[in-house]
């Protein structure tokens, strides 16, 4: 399938917050109540359209367990977006956000778009973290925030697509150097510069021109 | 429910049976390799191949027959068996020192007990000899790569089996020894070579003009710890490291699976990853072989796709993992051969069922291409299991997957309890979506909806437009109707053109007569007509005005109401609808009046009925002024020249209702004009009268004149008897008559003259034919249109000429011109007809009697030759028309 851009995402957060379920809901539109623990890193992909452009999202779903941290860290590099997920029914998962955020900031490129996600919004009765707290945390750390439910699919599409929109906007603004694949952005096969041997002068600027 | 649902590591199963391989001949444990100092092992094409440090190659057949040959003088170090060809590539040494040699063996060709060696090539990067560390050959036999201890990789391009025409180049250089090499074909053309050292993974696109290298990983792996996966994992390179197993595509790293432990050997077998690892427990189990203790290894078989461990067991120091004959063979440090036989799918599934692990069973069955019946069986079992656990929501989801195979009643029966109506509804919906629903199912589903009072679902089920119908419409209508969901029933009836149902519901249930009427107005003509006949009476009694309007439309210029002026105009016959107007004579009057006005040529029945209605009205009217009006109306109808009422019936009607004016008028209409004698009698009556009755005489005369009842002479004679009749009375009449006679005479004379001239002309023509010569100049045959040749036949008539053979085959008799014959025959027929009719005396008398002008009849008969004595029809040359008469043929032979 042809695409204009490929964005790499990473989903991080404590174990059991619903990372794999979010991915499954987004890529397969289904919910699996019984899910194997992710050991290692898996990935899923889906096409979306932003601003009339086909964008392929390649999403890396990581294991949340502490023991796998060293492996998952190596996947931070080369991600353009991150979904930092906590479980609104478990305060400890919210308390660990700072650690996750530090980890992500340290091992990824500085422009990475991070979206904070409070998952399991369908379990309102068992809520342990107020929505306002999530919003406050996001505001404080400059993240986008959203509460989702992988079970009912509420806001799942929005979470992934809004992140993509943010990345797309950053590309338009010239923040990302899209010629550096380490940023987690790839230009689609047919959108690559027609003459690769041509010296690219000032990557962002010339690309901006091409987009318009 | 979320949290507890997680399993905290991969599930373990025992899907392989371990067996120590025994020699089929002796029944003893296979030990023919017990003294072999194994250096390398591969498998393929029905044998296991083991190389040793003494330079021997051992081939083990399926029957465990061992054949041995010396491949190298000193030792064998590496082996590579191709999958699609029975070719073995080996690396070993023939001389002391570092002198690795590549040998290619054709295992299909055995000469003197030894496979034919087709190629011997020195393996050396550049000019510095260094030991070989790994070897890979592409299946297309065009590429071979050899990795060395000094970190370089040499690529051989060209036919692998031959030494000649191959090109070598160094594609990779790195200080670290090469630990793994693998080819990958991507797409139709690109060929990649993965190079693994213990510090990086590089993919090189070798199919382009220039090698394109990209580093896909910044760490590497030990020897034997890389393997290519098969299509189930998209032919990725799999690399095992201490912490995890990583997957790679040429363009970068893919997923990883964290399996802790030092890995010694990776092998891929039918979607399974086999990992030989060191036991990471502190407690090391050891096996003892000849007083020498062996380290134990753990062999683990992972199902990567379905994420479980299919087998795991300790083995003494595994030195070879081979996949052949559908099994995995492990060569242990004790030189025993262990076979891992995969259990069949059914056994595996049963194991999963026992543990209630249905989801895994389903995905396993799917990945093993289990057939539909089998899968449905699993869904059913899973559904039953969930149902038993009380998870009805989950159960119904499984049962839905069985739709089409599993008997629906099996499921329905389980959920008939009122508590489960939601589940039942869901199942029935799915059943409908799958087009598997019967009438009963539709009924049941609709009953569910109605019982649930779930109007929105019902709406969705029924009212959704542009949706394919997956249920029996009539049943649905019936159920909706019974449940008083009339709007739904109506919607369905309208959408599916079940007019009968629609009207019944409108008329019998909701009594929206107006809408029913509008609906009929939109139907096609035939349907509209039929339905109006059927329901007209009800409609007429409820909404007479609108019904009458529709009927008017139907019987004059009907086309469906919303066809936008298109569509064919059709009309029904009004008389068939009269019965509808029982008890509503004013509307019937209105309707019929309209019909008569629009279509004056309506059948007499209509007029009769109108007349009857008028008269009935008239009789029952008390108010005298209105009565006068009604009289006028009735008279107008009677006097209307277009009115096609039946005279007799009208007369009866008028008499029955004692409508005098009508009776008189009808008599007048019936008798006066018809009997001419009446006028003649009237004339003589007036003529005899002595009073001055000029006006009456004038009237009578004009009638006589108009109808030509009496010859003028007789009129004059009659009037002559009268003393009062003056010339002025008859003057006009006589003048007009005389004038007419004069004109007639002149016309006759003109005709006589014309006929004379015609006759004269014909005579001259006959004379000419008799006396003068005729020249035949035609150059073409009149039949076939080809140039005329002898022998030919000529006719005098046109003249026409023919080939003789054409003439003979075409003409009906040889004395008549075939072209003129039809024309001649017509004339002959006329004459013959006249001849015949002259003998029909009765007919003649009859005609004479009825004729107004007897003389002309007689003259006509005379003209036909009543008095001719001789017959003149046969072969008469005198009857000619425009020179096309019968003529004798003249033959040129």
Image (spheres, coloured by chain):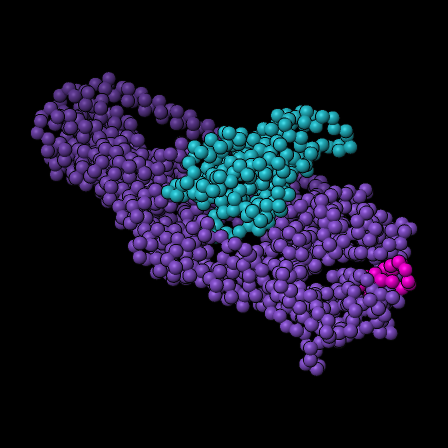
Q: Main secondary structure of the magenta part?
A: strand
- Tell me if residue B92 is in the magenta stretch: yes
Residue A75 seen in the figure: yes
Is the residue A182 above or below the residue B390 in the image? above
Q: In this view, does A94 lie to the left or right of B30?
A: left
Q: In this view, does A205 lie to the left or right of B209?
A: left
Q: Which of B685 and B490 is in front in this view?
A: B490
Q: Give the range drawn in magenta.
A: B88-109
Q: Which of B571 and B304 is in front in this view?
A: B304
Where residue B151 sits: x, y (%)? 81, 49
Is the residue B200 above or below the residue B622 in the image? below
- Tell me if residue B533 is in the magenta stretch: no
**Point 9% across, 26% down: residue:** B624
Where residue A24 sits: x, y (%)? 52, 46
Is the residue A19 above or below the residue B550 in the image? below
Chain B: colour as depicted: purple
**Point 32% across, 57% down: residue:** B416
Where residue B274 sits: x, y (%)? 65, 60
**Point 34% across, 57% down: residue:** B415
Q: Is residue A125 left or right of residue B589?
A: right
Q: Nearer the viewer, residue B52 or B776?
A: B52
Residue B315 seen in the figure: no
Q: Which of A41 and B511 is in front in this view?
A: A41
Residue most extreme to the bottom? B26
Q: Quarter-wise, where is residue A152 in the image?
A: top left
Where residue B687 sits: x, y (%)? 18, 25
Residue most extreme to the top? B728
Chain A: colour as depicted: cyan
**Point 58% across, 62% down: residue:** B310
């Amino acid at each position: 399938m042809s695409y204009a851009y490929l964005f790499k995402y990473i989903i991080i957060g404590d174990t059991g917050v619903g990372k794999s379920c979010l991915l499954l809901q987004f890529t397969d539109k289904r919910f699996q109540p019984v899910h194997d623990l992710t050991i290692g890193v898996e990935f899923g992909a889906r096409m979306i359209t932003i601003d009339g452009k086909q964008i392929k999202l390649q999403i890396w779903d990581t294991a949340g367990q502490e023991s796998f941290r060293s492996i998952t860290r190596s996947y931070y590099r080369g991600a353009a977006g991150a979904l930092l997920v906590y479980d609104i029914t478990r305060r400890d998962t919210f308390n660990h956000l700072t650690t996750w955020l530090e980890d992500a900031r340290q091992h990824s490129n500085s422009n990475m778009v991070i979206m904070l996600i409070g998952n399991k919004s369908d379990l309102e009765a068992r809520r342990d973290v107020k929505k306002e707290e999530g919003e406050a945390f996001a505001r404080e750390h400059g993240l986008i925030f959203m509460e989702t439910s992988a079970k009912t699919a509420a806001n799942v599409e929005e979470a992934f697509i809004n992140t993509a929109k943010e990345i797309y906007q950053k590309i338009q603004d010239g923040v990302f150097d899209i010629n550096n694949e380490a940023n987690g952005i790839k230009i689609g096969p047919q959108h690559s510069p027609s003459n690769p041997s041509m010296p690219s002068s000032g990557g962002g600027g010339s690309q901006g021109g091409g987009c318009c | 429910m979320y949290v507890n649902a997680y399993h905290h590591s991969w599930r373990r199963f025992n899907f392989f049976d371990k067996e120590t391989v025994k020699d089929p001949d002796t029944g003893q444990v296979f030990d023919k390799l017990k003294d072999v100092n194994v250096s390398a092992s591969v498998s393929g094409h029905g044998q296991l191949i083991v190389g040793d440090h003494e330079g021997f190659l051992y081939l083990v057949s399926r029957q465990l027959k061992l054949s041995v040959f010396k491949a190298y003088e000193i030792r064998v170090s590496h082996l590579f068996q191709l999958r699609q060809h029975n070719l073995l590539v080996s690396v070993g040494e023939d001389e002391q020192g570092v002198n690795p040699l590549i040998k290619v063996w054709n295992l299909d060709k055995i000469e003197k007990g030894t496979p034919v060696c087709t190629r011997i090539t020195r393996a050396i990067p550049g000019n510095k000899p260094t030991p070989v560390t790994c070897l890979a050959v592409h299946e297309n036999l065009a590429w071979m790569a050899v990795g060395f201890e000094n970190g370089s990789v040499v690529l051989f391009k060209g036919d692998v089996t031959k030494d000649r025409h191959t090109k070598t180049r160094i594609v990779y250089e790195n200080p670290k020894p090469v630990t793994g090499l693998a080819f990958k074909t991507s797409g139709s053309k690109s060929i990649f070579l993965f190079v693994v050292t213990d510090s990086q993974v590089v993919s090189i696109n070798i199919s382009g003009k220039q090698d394109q290298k990209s580093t896909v990983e910044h760490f590497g792996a030990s020897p034997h710890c890389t393997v290519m996966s098969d299509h189930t994992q998209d032919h990725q390179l799999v690399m095992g490291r201490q912490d995890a197993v990583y997957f790679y595509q040429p363009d970068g790293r893919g997923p990883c699976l964290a399996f802790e432990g030092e890995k010694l050997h990776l092998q891929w077998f039918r979607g399974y990853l086999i990992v030989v690892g060191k036991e990471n427990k502190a407690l090391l189990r050891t096996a003892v072989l000849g007083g020498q203790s062996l380290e134990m290894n753990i062999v683990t078989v992972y199902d990567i796709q379905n994420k479980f461990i299919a087998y795991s067991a300790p083995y003494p120091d595994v030195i070879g993992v081979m996949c052949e004959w559908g099994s995995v063979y492990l060569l242990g440090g004790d030189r025993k051969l262990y076979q891992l036989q995969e259990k069949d799918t059914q056994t595996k599934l049963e194991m999963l069922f026992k543990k209630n692990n249905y989801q895994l069973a389903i995905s396993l069955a799917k990945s093993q291409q289990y057939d539909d019946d089998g899968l449905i069986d699993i869904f059913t079992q899973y559904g039953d299991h969930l149902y038993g656990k009380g998870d009805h929501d989950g159960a119904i989801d499984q049962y839905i997957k069985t739709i089409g195979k599993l008997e629906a009643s099996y499921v329905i029966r389980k959920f008939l309890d009122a508590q489960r109506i939601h589940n039942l509804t869901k199942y029935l919906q799915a059943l409908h979506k799958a087009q598997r629903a019967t009438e009963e199912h539709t009924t049941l589903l609709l009953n569910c909806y109605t019982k649930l009072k779930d109007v929105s679902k019902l709406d969705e089920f029924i009212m959704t437009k542009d949706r394919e119908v997956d249920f029996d419409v009539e049943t649905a209508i019936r159920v909706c109707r019974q449940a008083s969901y009339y709007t739904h029933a109506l919607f369905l009836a309208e959408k599916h053109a079940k007019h009968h149902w629609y009207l019944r519901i409108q008329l019998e249930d909701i009594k929206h007569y107006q809408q029913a009427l509008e609906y009929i107005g939109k139907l096609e003509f035939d349907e509209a007509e039929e339905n109006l006949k059927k329901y007209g009476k009800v409609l007429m009694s409820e909404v007479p005005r609108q019904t009458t309007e529709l009927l008017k439309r139907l019987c004059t210029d009907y086309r469906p109401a919303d066809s936008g002026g298109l569509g064919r105009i059709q009309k029904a016959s009004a008389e068939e609808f009269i019965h509808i107007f029982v008890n509503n004579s004013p509307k019937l009057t209105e309707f019929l009046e309209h019909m008569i006005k629009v279509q004056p040529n309506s059948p007499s029945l209509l007029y009769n009925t109108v007349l009857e209605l008028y008269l009935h009205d008239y009789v029952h009217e008390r108010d005298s002024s209105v009565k006068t009006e009604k009289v006028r109306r009735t008279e107008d109808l009677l006097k209307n020249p277009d009115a096609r009422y039946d005279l007799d019936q009208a007369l009866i009607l008028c008499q029955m209702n004692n409508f005098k004016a009508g009776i008189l008028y009808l008599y007048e209409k019936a008798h006066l004009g018809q009997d001419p004698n009446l006028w003649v009698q009237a004339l003589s009556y007036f003529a005899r009268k002595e009073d001055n009755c000029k006006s009456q005489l004038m009237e009578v005369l004009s009638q006589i004149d108009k109808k030509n009842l009496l010859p003028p002479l007789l009129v004059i004679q009659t009037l002559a008897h009268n003393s009062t009749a003056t010339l002025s009375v008859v003057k006009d009449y006589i003048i007009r008559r005389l004038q007419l006679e004069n004109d007639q005479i002149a016309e006759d004379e003109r005709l006589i003259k014309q006929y004379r001239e015609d006759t004269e002309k014909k005579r001259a023509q006959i004379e000419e034919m008799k006396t003068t010569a005729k020249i035949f100049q035609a150059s073409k045959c009149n039949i076939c249109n080809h140039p005329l040749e002898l022998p030919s036949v000529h006719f005098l008539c046109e003249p026409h000429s023919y080939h003789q053979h054409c003439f003979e085959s075409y003409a009906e008799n040889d004395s008549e011109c075939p072209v003129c014959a039809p024309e001649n025959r017509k004339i002959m027929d006329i004459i013959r007809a006249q001849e015949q009719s002259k003998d029909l005396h009765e007919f003649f008398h009859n005609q004479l009697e009825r004729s107004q002008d007897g003389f002309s009849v007689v003259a006509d008969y005379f003209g036909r030759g009543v008095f001719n004595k001789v017959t003149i029809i046969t072969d008469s040359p005198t009857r000619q028309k425009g020179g096309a008469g019968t003529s004798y043929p003249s033959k040129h032979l």
